[in-house]
Amino acid sequence: MSEQDAGQIRNRSGSQAQLGSGDRGSSASTLLEQSRSAERVSGPAGSQAELGNQECSQNRMPPAPVAFHYTQTDSFVALLHQLGASLLVSTYQANKLLAVRATGNGLSTLVRSFDKPMGLAVDGPRLALGTRKEVWLLRNAPDIAPQVEPLGQHDACFLPRSSHITGDIGIHEVAWVGDELWFVSTRFSCLATLSPDYSFVPRWRPPFISALAAEDRCHLNGLALVDGQPHYVTALGTADVRDGWRADKPHGGCIIDVPSGEFVTRGLSMPHSPRWHDGQLWALESGTGSVVHVDQVAGNREIVTSLPGFARGLAMAGPYAFVGLSKIRATSAMDGVPLAERRNQLRSPR
């Protein structure tokens, strides 16, 4: 799947694996069901997809349809069975949220359309999804799940219950912190929360950012929780001017400790998706296509594996990591970024 951005794993017990808390419960088939009817169509490799449009806010048209297809390996299906989990994936280029579920020897993938979906978070019965101009809040309706066709195959049915208009603030990642939803506003270079009285409430910004402004100064993008609290963030640069991060994409990235405001490590190439898992810090170095392990005390980094694409979106369950990869779009400005050396092999036709 191209342009994958964020992933979560949810199992029957209601826990999630987001680089940290993966339960290996019984098999699950997470379903996002809208009030509209869905159409089931055949997918490649014997898989299935359910297609349906997400109802948008009143007086707004749904996003334009984008051609979409997928394939899968046998080992991927077996792994989902082993973990007893389903995988949620957002892909903002195709305007889709995917619920990827193992069924028999293949996959059943539910496809829902949202306007530029990016960050998402599951916590028990609640699911949050950041989109272009709003945050969607969905709730599980377990009494409805067994009634969804095919009968008795679903253990969860997430229904949209509300949305909060934030405006176009660039919600890259979201996370439940107790009863609050925290998210990264890339455009305003800050961590923020929701409020019924405001579009959003800024809660934290890097010490080098001098003012709250819609200027995408450092391209703050990723958020990791430790003990249920915001603890690490990733940024593509440390500039304090509009789009300043673009000047040093090859080596300007960093991971920041939120409580202290200190740098954990610097010199990364376009880092994303920090995760705290099994007492250790992990992240994606998108500019090299690598998964990295970070010593949060010394700041040293170790490349765990290098992948054939722009790595963005990370979920972990036990010893396994699910990594979203994107091909390099023809319009992407990747000059100087290490991954650009493989541009011809990785380029998307779009």
Image: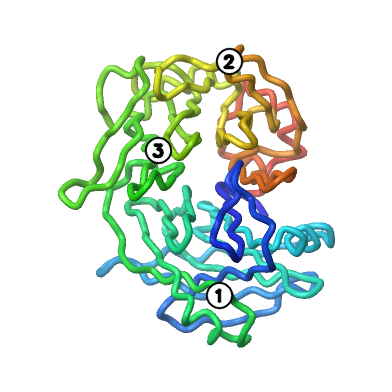
Residue 286 visible in the snapshot? no
State which mark lies toward you, 1 or 3: 3
State which mark lies toward you, 3 or 2: 2
Between the residue at mark 3 and the residue at mark 2, the CA separation in whole angstroms equals 24 Å
Residue in view at x 57 percent, y 27 percent: 270
**Can you tell which mark lies on residue 51?**
1
Q: Is residue 57 left or right of residue 145?
A: left
Q: Is residue 34 left or right of residue 273?
A: left
Asked if disc 1 and disc 3 are in contact, CB closer than 8 Å, the reply is: no
Q: Earlier in the sequence, mark 3 or mark 2?
A: 3
Q: Quadrant of the N terminus?
A: bottom right
Q: Earlier in the sequence, mark 1 or mark 2?
A: 1
Can you identify the residue that label 2 sits on?
Answer: 297
Between the residue at mark 1 and the residue at mark 3, the CA separation in whole angstroms equals 29 Å
Give the farthest residue toward the left: 197
Which amino acid does the dot numbered 1 rest on? Answer: Leu
> Callout 1: helix, strand or loop?
strand
> Callout 3: helix, strand or loop?
strand
Asked if disc 3 and disc 2 are in contact, CB closer than 8 Å, the reply is: no
Which amino acid does the dot numbered 2 rest on? Answer: Val
Instruction: Using the rendered view, name the quadrant where residue 137 is placed.
Output: bottom left
Residue 105, image x and y in percent?
A: 81, 72
Number of residues whose C-alpha sits closer than 10 Å to that of mark 3, classed few (under 14), some (14–19) or many (20 or more): many
Residue in view at x 62 percent, y 46 percent: 315
**Can you tell which mark lies on residue 184?**
3
Which amino acid does the dot numbered 3 rest on? Answer: Val
